[in-house]
Image: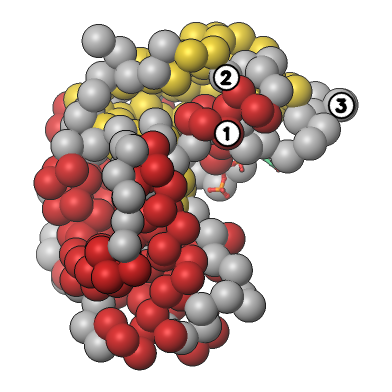
Amino acid sequence: MTLLAVENLRVSAPSRELVHGVSFALAPGERLGLVGESGSGKSLTAMAVVGLLATGLRTDGSILLDGRQVVGQPDRRIVPLRGAVASVVFQDPRAALDPLMRLGRQLAEPIRRRAAREGRSLTARALRDEQARWLDRVAIADSRRILNAYPHEVSGGQRQRIAIAMALACGPRLLIADEPTTALDVTTQAEVLDLLDDLVRAEGLALLFISHDLPVVARIADRVIVMRQGEMVEEGPAARVFSQPQHDYTKMLVGAARRLQAALTGDALP
Ligand SMILES: Nc1ncnc2c1ncn2[C@@H]1O[C@H](COP(=O)(O)OP(=O)(O)OP(=O)(O)O)[C@@H](O)[C@H]1O
């Protein structure tokens, strides 16, 4: 069964088309990477899936999320799919966090929504336990302080871990991660990537992972779509795309990633 089927997706601004007919499908538990340079249409494609495009942008084509059409639907039809079927982790965790609300209250929201959806009643004690469990799962120690803190009182890495906890606490079947580690320092990037990898596996989620960073995508995705200027230029298993890129643009991306790697490690180029 297909969890997400995107067919001939087009996204247009009033003056020009930005995404030119993208098609792909994602099965439950599958991990797909969208890779390409800045401005290639990765985020627009991903945001269209959950109906989160900016007003003024028009979507054509078909997006079936868990069998339900997203394109052309009013918000009241798409909102129930957010969280329950697909959630999003953004590059900047502040996009998901209210700066004026304590983190504990924010984390309580998705936990409550999931419980309500599953018909479970949640005592105050059970809610506190769940909050602590989620913080533990995203490797945040000192949970009492963090739950009482406001977003600006914790580190960028901690904010992103909490945003991940909130996205997963909703109980989705698909996680869309849009450059989730780009805003973090290199050490924190690696930790957060490992964490995402482990959690997505443990929860059995499908993953749509967006990044301009090929080695990162190769590490986390089974399959990769390479985008350029709003078009898909290559698609295939991650290992094949990186070892034997077919399209000139992919060859260029792989070459650049190899040169950077060689420069960082001091190794000779293969
Ligand atoms: N609301 C909008 N109105 C008009 N053009 C837009 C809008 N949002 C994005 N674009 C344009 O659409 C193109 C694709 O944008 P998109 O954000 O999908 O790129 P991306 O591949 O995710 O890049 P990045 O990695 O920098 O986020 C860009 O040229 C961008 O400027």
Residue at 20% across, 29% down: 29
- The residue at which mark 1 appears reads as 79
Which of the two labelled residues, at mark 2 and mark 1, occupies the earlier sequence position? 2
Residue at 31% across, 62% down: 123
Q: Quadrant of residue 166?
A: bottom left
Which of the two labelled residues, at mark 1 and mark 3, occupies the earlier sequence position? 3
SS of the residue at dot 3? loop
Q: Is residue 6 above or below residue 183?
A: above
Q: In the image shown, does 84 or 50 lie closer to the viewer? A: 84
SS of the residue at dot 1? helix
Which of the two labelled residues, at mark 2 and mark 3, occupies the earlier sequence position? 3
Q: In the image shown, does 188 or 263 lie closer to the viewer? A: 188
Q: Nearer the viewer, mark 1 or mark 3?
A: 1
Q: Is residue 83 above or below residue 169?
A: above
- The residue at which mark 3 appears reads as 15
Q: Amino acid at mark 3?
A: Ser
Q: What colour scheme governs how the chains and residues are painted in the rendered image of this protein?
A: secondary structure
Q: How many marks?
A: 3
Q: Is residue 153 above or below residue 180?
A: below
Horizontally, residue 29 falls left or right of residue 147, namely left
Residue 195 appears in the figure: yes
Residue at 70% across, 23% down: 74
Q: Amino acid at mark 1?
A: Val
Horizontally, residue 75 falls left or right of residue 118, namely right
Q: Position of residue 64 (x, y in %)?
A: 47, 14
Q: Quadrant of the N terminus?
A: top left
Q: Nearer the viewer, mark 2 or mark 3?
A: 2
Q: Position of residue 110 (x, y in %)?
A: 42, 53
- The residue at which mark 2 appears reads as 70
Q: Quadrant of residue 67?
A: top left
